[in-house]
Image (tube, rainbow, N blue to C red):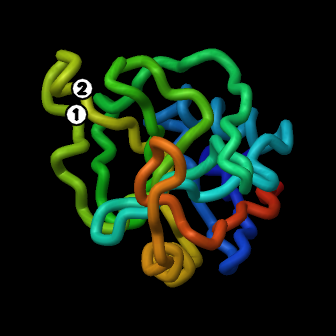
Amino acid sequence: MSASPIVRMQTSMGQIAIELNTEKAPISSENFLSYVRDGFYEQTIFHRVIPNFMIQGGGFTPQMKQKKTKAEIKNEANNGLLNARGTLAMARTQVVDSATCQFFINLVDNDFLNHKAPTPNGYGYAVFGKVTEGMEVVDEIAKVATGNFGHHQDVPKDAVIIQSVSIDE
C-alpha cells in the first residue's frame, strides 16, 4: 500500500476521495483504514451537519442507532496538520484520547480545533487526511436541511448515507 492511501467514499450525494496522511497521523490513518477494511462505514450516515463548520459521520445507521466501535485511540492532534477546509479529522468527546470511528470533514479553516497545548482544553482534533476529489459533494452535504433527533442536533432530515468505502490499491 502506498504511503498516502486514497480512500473513495460513495455517498448518496456523490463520491468523495480522501488522501490519508499515514506519515504524520499513522494511528488515526490505520484506525480509519481498519474500519474501511471491515466494511464498518457502509450504510452509516453523516449524522451532524453544520454549515460553515463541518460534516460529521461514520458512527450511526440511517435509523440513528450508534454502531459498536473498536477501542479508543491516541489523539494525534499535535502532528502539525491543521483543521483547514477539506481536511478529515477524528471526532471525539471531551476526553482527549476518545476517538473511535467517527470523523469529520472541515468545511472552513477551523483554527480553534487545532492543537495548542497538551491540556484537555488545548489538545485539539487530529487531522489525518484531506479531500482530493469531491469537495463539491461535501459542500452539497453541508446544505441539507437539518433538525433534532432525540438529543442529537444538526441531524439531516433526509439521511445522507455512506453507501460504500474502498481503498485504492
Number of labelled discs?
Answer: 2
Left or right of 11, for residue 114: left
Tell me which amino acid carries mark 2.
Answer: Tyr
Residue bearing the label numbered 2: 123
Answer with left or right where residue 141 lies relative to residue 82.
Answer: right
Q: CA distance from mark 2 to mark 1?
A: 5 Å
* x 18%, y 16%: residue: 119
Q: Earlier in the sequence, mark 2 or mark 1?
A: 1
Residue 83, percent across and down? 30, 51
Query: Looking at the picture, how far across and down is residue 13, in whole percent?
Result: 66, 79
Q: Quadrant of the N terminus?
A: top right
**Mark 1 surroundings: few (<14), some (14-19) or many (≥20) residues within 10 A:** many
Q: Nearer the viewer, residue 141 or 87?
A: 141
Q: Quadrant of the C terminus?
A: bottom right
* Residue lying at 56% horizontally and 40% vertically, measured from the top left: 102
Badge 2 vs badge 1, beta-carbon distance below 8 Å:
yes
Extreme-front residue of the structure: 150
Q: Residue at x 67, y 36 (%)?
A: 66
Query: Quick one: 57 or 26, which is closer to the camera?
Result: 57
Q: Is residue 25 left or right of residue 52?
A: right
Q: Vertically, is 146 above or below 48?
A: below
Which of the pair 46/106 is nearer the observer?
46
Going by the numbered disc 1, the residue's amino acid type is: His
- Residue position marked by numbered label 1 in the rendering: 115
